[in-house]
């Protein structure tokens, strides 16, 4: 699998994740304590972008229906999320965040 550059590291903060689209997939790029994570950006319960949700510690809460997901694992922790999120491998090369689909 190839690595795909999706954004620069300075485009993502703990308070402001980055929404990207790669091969028709909506992906959220998050940073927690200097570690970067890429997860499916659309809540599986109803269309809402998780990058617009409430971030606390290592979780993100859907802005519409309060489903809570683990950012590092994509695991549904509570609420009506229906299932875990897809996650993607992430690396940083020359200040660029790259993911594998």
Image (cartoon, rainbow, N blue to C red):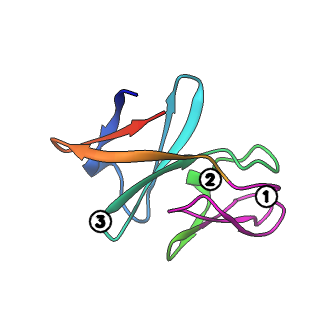
Q: Considering only order in the chain, which callout, 2 or 1, is on the residue closer to the N terminus?
A: 2
- Tag 2–tag 3 contact (CB < 8 Å): no
Measured Cα–Cα span from mark 2 to mark 3: 19 Å
Is 69 on the left or on the right of 27, as rendered? Answer: right
35 over 45 or under it: above or below: below
Nearest the eye: 97 or 20? 97
Tag on residue 81? Answer: 1
The answer to if 10 sits in the magenta stretch is: no
Question: Distance from label 1 to label 2 (Cα)?
Answer: 11 Å
- Check the image and report above or below for 50 versus 65: above
Disc nearest the viewer among 1 and 2? 1
Question: Which residue is under mark 2?
Answer: 50
Report the magenta residues as a range.
60-84
Alpha carbon of mark 3 to alpha carbon of mark 1: how far? 27 Å
- Residue found 59% across the figure and 31% down from its top: 25
SS at mark 1 in the image: loop
Residue at 42% x, 46% y: name it: 89
> Closer to us: mark 2 or mark 3?
3
Mark 1, Cα crowd under 10 Å, few <14 / some 14-19 / many 20+, is many
Up/down of 73 relative to 57, above or below: above
Instruction: Quadrant for residue 79, please give it.
Output: bottom right
Which image quarter is the N terminus in?
top left
Confirm whether the magenta stretch covers residue 69: yes
Rendered image quadrant of residue 94: top left
Q: Which mark is residue 34?
A: 3
Query: Label 2 crowding class (10 Å Cα cut-off): few <14, some 14-19, many 20+?
Result: many
Residue at horizontal 37%, vertical 47%? 90
Q: Which residue appears at 60% of the width and 45% of the height?
A: 41
Residue 49: where, in percent of width, then height?
A: 64, 47
């Amino acid at each position: 699998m190839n690595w795909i550059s999706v954004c620069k590291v300075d485009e993502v903060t703990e308070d402001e994740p980055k929404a990207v689209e790669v091969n028709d997939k909506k992906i959220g790029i998050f940073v927690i304590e200097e570690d970067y994570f890429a997860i499916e950006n659309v809540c599986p319960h109803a269309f809402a972008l998780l990058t617009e949700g409430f971030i606390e510690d290592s979780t993100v809460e859907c802005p519409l229906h309060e489903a809570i997901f683990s950012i590092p694992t994509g695991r549904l922790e509570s609420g009506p999320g229906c299932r875990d999120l897809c996650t993607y491998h992430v690396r940083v090369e020359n200040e660029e965040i790259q993911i594998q689909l």
